[in-house]
Amino acid sequence: MSLVRKSSATGSWQVRSGSLAAGSWLDRLAWTALSLTVLIVLWAIAAAIAQNRHGPGPLAVFQVMAGEAASGALWVHLSATLARVLASFVIAMLIGSAIGLALGRNKLADKFFDAWLVLFLNLPALVIIALSYVWLGPWETTAITAVAINKIPNAAVQMREGARNLSRDLDEMALVYRFGWWKTLRYVTLPQLGPFFAAAARSGLALVWKIVLVVEALGGHSKGVGHQIFTAFQSFDVAVILAYALAFIAVIQFVEFGALQPMQARLNRWKR
Amino acid sequence: MPRAINSRDDAAALQVDVQSKTFAAVAGRVAHTVLRNVSLAVAPKSFVVITGPSGCGKSTLLNIVAGLDRDYEGQIRFSAADPRVSFIFQTPRLLPWCTVEQNIALPLADGDPRRANIPELLARVGLSGAETAYPERLSLGMQRRVAIARGFVLEPDILLMDEPFVSLDDPTAHALRTLVVELWQRHRATVLFVTHDRTESVRLATRIVRMAALTDGLASNIVSDTAVALTEAQRADPVAVRAELARVFDAA
C-alpha cells in the first residue's frame, strides 16, 4: 500500500514539495493507526508480564471505558470537560490575540509589557489555579478564568510574533489603493496572521485541556474528566484513570484532526 | 537654472514642492537629508521619467507623492480634487493568498462598474486563463503583469511607477515596457516613472528629469529637465535612441 502516491492524484506539485503535511492525510492516518496498534500491543505485553493490579492491560481499560460509556457517565464527564476546554480556549485565544497584536504593533507598549508577559509565562499553572479559587470562589467561571489566564500569555507571544512580521510593503500597497480598514484587515492583515493563529490554536488546545483537568481536580467540581480521574486516584483505580484519559485524548485528537488541521490546510492553500 | 521656468504651473496635473526630506538617525546611521528644494510641475497626460544614481532619493520622492511618506517639508498638489492614484512598485506586492483576478479587483469597490473591464484588461496584459492562479505559482514577469493590471484597473489620474521592470530578463522587460506604453496611451494617465536605466528612460519618457547630489553626501535635487523629442517609431530605433541618450544626458 503506497499511500504517498495518493497525493499525486491531486497535483504533481504536492509530490515535488516532498512534505507529508502537504495534503496526504490518508497517509498520515495510516501511519497513526500503525503506530498506535504497535503501542497497544507493547502495552498488552508489558501488562501480561507485570501481572500487577496497578498495571491493567488495554483490554481491562477498554472494558472500563465501555462500561462508563454504557452507563452514560463517560459522556457526562467528557462533555463537561469539553465545554470548559472550548470556553477557556476561545476566551484565551481572543484575549491573547488582542494583546499580542497590540504589543506587536506598538513598540512602546511592547517594551513596557514584555516583562509582564515573561512573568505570566513563567507563573506555574498551579499558582494561577490556587489564587483564582481563593480570590474568585468555587464557581464554573473561576475554572474557565483560571485556564484562560494560563493560556493567554502563550497566545499573546505567538500573535505578537505574527504582528511583528506584518509586511510594510503590503500595508503601503493597501494604503495607496485605498483599501480602507475593513478590506485591509480582511485581505492584508488577517491572512498574514493566519499561520500564527493556527499555530497558537493547536498548541493552545493541547495546553488548555491538560490544565482543565488539573482545575477540575483541585476546584472540587462534581463533573468532568479531571474530577473522575482525581476520584479514581484516591482509590488507586488505574483502569478508570486510563479509560478517562484515553477517551479525552481521542476527543482532542478528533478536534485537531477534524477541525484545526483542515483549517490550517485551507489557510495555506495558496502556498507553492 | 532651467527648472525654475516651470516649477510653478497652474495647468499641471501634479505639482511637487519638497523643500527638504530628512531621514532620522537609525541603527548607527546619522541623520541625513536626501532631498532639498525639489520642484516639479507635471503636465497632464505626460510620461515623466525621474532618473538618477541609486540612493539619490528618487523612490523617496515617489513615496512622498503617493502619500506613503508624510514626514517631509513641502507640499504636493494635484489638479484633481480627489485624484485616483495607482502605484506600481519595484516588487509586485501582490497578495499571495488572493488569486490573480482578486488581486486586480481589490482596489475597486464591490459594485464598481470598472470590474466589468477586468477580463479585457487581463487579456491585454496576457493573463487570460490565469485568473484563478495564485501569484506564487507565477513567474516574476507574470506577477509584474498582474501588478500592472492592478495599476490600470482604477483608470488612474496619476500613475506612479518605481523601477517596475528590474530583475527581469531583457525580452520580458521590453515586452512589459511596450505593454505599459500601450496602456498609458489608451488610458492617458499622468505618469511619474522612476528608473536608473537611462536607455529605458529615453524609450519611455515624454520628459526626463535627472536627479543627483551635486556633492557627495549632500541632498539631491533636480540637475536637468529635458523634453524627449522622439516619435513612437524612433523609440524602437536603437540609433535614434542612442542619439537622444547623448542629447539628454551629455548636455548637462
Image: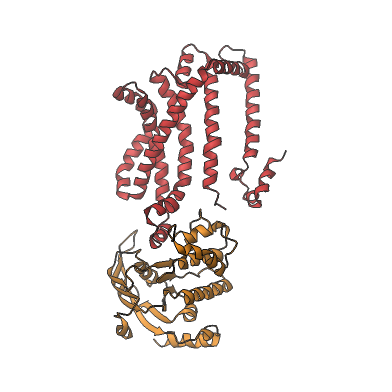
Chain colours: A red, B orange
Residue at the spot 39% in from the left edge and 39% down from the top edge: A94
Number of dots carrying numbers: 0
Residue B90 seen anywhere in this rendered image of the structure: no
- Of the 4 image quadrants, the one containing the N terminus of chain B is bottom left
Residue lying furthest right: A1
Q: Which of B211 and A195 is in front in this view?
A: A195
Question: Which image quarter: residue A177?
Answer: bottom left
In the picture shown, does residue A90 fall above or below B196? above
Q: Nearer the viewer, residue B49 or B118?
A: B118
Question: Which image quarter: residue B79?
Answer: bottom left
Q: Is residue B172 left or right of residue A199?
A: right
* Residue A242, horizontal then vertical, whole percent: 54, 20
* Residue A169, horizontal then vertical, whole percent: 42, 59
Residue at the spot 59% in from the left edge and 43% down from the top edge: A21
Question: Which image quarter: residue B18?
Answer: bottom left
Residue at the spot 48% in from the left edge and 46% down from the top edge: A195
Q: Is residue A49 left or right of residue B13?
A: right
* Residue B60, horizontal then vertical, whole percent: 37, 68
Q: Is residue A71 left or right of residue A213?
A: right
In the picture shown, does residue B120 fall above or below A225? below
Residue at the spot 42% in from the left edge and 67% down from the top edge: B86
Residue A219 seen anywhere in this rendered image of the structure: yes
Q: Nearer the viewer, residue A131 or B86?
A: B86
* Residue B231, horizontal then vertical, whole percent: 49, 86
- Of the 4 image quadrants, the one containing the C terminus of chain B is bottom left
